[in-house]
Image (spheres, rainbow, N blue to C red):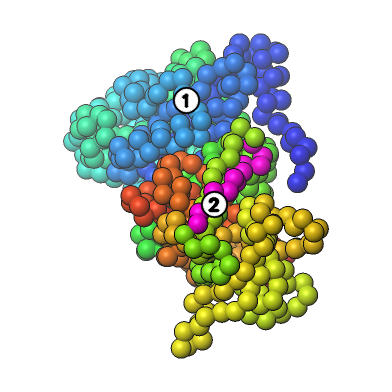
Amino acid sequence: MNNEKPTHFIHEMIEADLKSGRYQSVRTRFPPEPNGYLHIGHAKSIVLNFGTAKKYGGQCNLRFDDTNPTKEEVEYVESIQEDIRWLGYEWDELRFASDYFDQLYAWAVQLIKEGKAYVDDLSQEEIRQYRGTLTEPGRNSPYRDRSVEENLDLFERMKNGEFPDGSKVLRAKIDMASPNLNLRDPVMYRILHARHHRTGDQWCIYPMYDWAHGQSDAIEGISHSLCTLEFENHRPLYEWFLDNLPIAHKPRQIEFARLNLTYTVLSKRRLIRLVKEGHVRGWDDPRMPTLAGLRRRGVPPAAIRNFCEAIGVAKANSTIDLALFEYHIRQELNRIAERRMAVLDPVKVVITNYPEGQVEWLEAINNPEDESAGTRKIPFTRELYIERDDFREVRPNKKYHRLSIGHEVRLRYGYFIKAESVVKDEAGNILEIHCTYDPETRGGYAPDGRKVRGTIHWVSAPHAIDAEVRLYDRLFTVPDPRSEADKDFTEFINPNSLTVLTGCKLEPDLAAAAAGTHYQFERKGYFFLDPDSQPGRPVFNRTITLRDTWSKIAKSLGQK
């Protein structure tokens, strides 16, 4: 992986602003709408806004853009705060756009008095028709030249609830012939008789995003309003409102490319479909790109931060390979995850020459990347479990270094064992593998110097605990599920994105696995305890495999 630090055009602009004296300090904000759960795309904005404020010794606010009461809920407000704290950030001030409803209304009245805003009776569809196109100018609304007095009266009556939803709007009076469609008399207020999660029934008119956002930035003293690229064409409107109001402090809007990932959808509309149509088990399903889903899957927050910092910020949209995100997940988990042995598809091994009833406690390393993690004791007995796939009756070829009849293998931390025979049921399924062991090879080395190339993991049968293990994989089978115009993106859902294994056998100390602890199941991947766990019956989610297996899959499918 390329460790070269990416350029950061936003920080270059901020440093120029500080040097010129345009701003004396840096203040940013993260302004989500509380109408859903945050996803990995939002994480990029969180890392950028909070990280930028920290870099320059400034402040970062969390401000909820709660201007649409029909879609917003307290549940989302709370989940967003939880996600930001989980990522490792704390806001300087908690604000809501609804804190400024009185001031926004007063400023709207001022624009009306100055002849810069008017009440329009056109319907939403009529407004769209009058707006024109990219190549044709718009037409003035027949209500555009209402008198100041009539507009003031109508706007107050809108606020007082005299008109039904959709019957009137307040529009800024700018330029219906502007080449920028956002400046063709944009809507500032619409009528919504809906209860707000904070202001209750106090208001029945609510500001549009373009009207609320810039003014909220100004009120809070935001220096740099960092937005995704789709707001670039909105910047002239952002600045028009600031220039036409008595606002001394004028924030600077800077746009950056949003995050797009392969094998992932980040559209809120598509994510809602995944949940509502039952393709996933909810917003925190570990296959979802939501922060709640990533947290439940066991993705460390540091991996997300490192990934966002590694990709940097760009001025043009592009798509990042999911493999890069997975690389950062593996890097962080390799550093912090304690090692354990877990047998996911068990078959019993009986060591026929090992004393019955004897238990040896072998020392195992918790994390070779972290000496402070120490060691643990694991029991070794006559009966063990190994992976069914780690045994073949007949050695298939010379490159096969796992267990087979007449050949030795090393047990991790234990002894050399040699398979002698098998016990099968009537259908020919292997029930037990009978082996012998060499008592001189404790620790995995032979005094006579003989070499054993294969090492496999195992669990003591009398001490093993049963567990359910959920193997999660990529939710989609193609890099861009949106790419086929004639197909619905759900047609590309990976049918193997979740495999549930029961009867798995784990090291005994995993019965007391702590929530929030990351584990590497040796040779199997990284795993994380799921909230569905019950005392004595843990459930583990696979966060990620030890290696990237998708490059081979993509190659077999002919993908580049």
Q: Is residue 299 toward the left or the right of residue 35 in the image?
A: right
In the depicted structure, whether residue 166 falls above or below residue 541: above
- Residue 247 lies, in percent from the top left, at 48, 15
Residue 296 locus on image (x, y percent): 44, 47
Q: Is residue 221 magenta?
A: no
Residue position marked by numbered label 2 in the rendering: 360
The circle drawn on residue 9 is none
Q: Nearer the viewer, residue 322 or 389?
A: 389
The answer to whether residue 131 is above or below residue 505 is above
The residue that appears at 56% across and 79% down in the rendered structure is 422
Q: Give me the residue at 23% from left, 37% from top.
A: 195
Kindly identify which residue carries mark 1.
90
Is 371 placed left or right of 3 in the picture? left
Question: Is 363 a magenta residue?
Answer: yes
Residue at far bottom of view: 426
For the residues labelled 2 and 1, the Cα–Cα distance comes to 49 Å
Badge 2 element: strand
Q: Which of 340 and 319 is in front in this view?
A: 340
Residue extent of the magenta highlight: 358-370
Label 2 environment density (alpha carbons within 10 Å; few <14, some 14–19, many ≥20): few
- The foreground one among 312 and 98 is 312
The residue under the point 75% across, 78% down is: 397
* SS category of the residue bearing label 1: loop
Marks 2 and 1, the one that precedes in the sequence: 1
For the residues labelled 2 and 1, say whether their Cβ atoms are less than 8 Å apart: no
Residue 76 picture quarter: top left
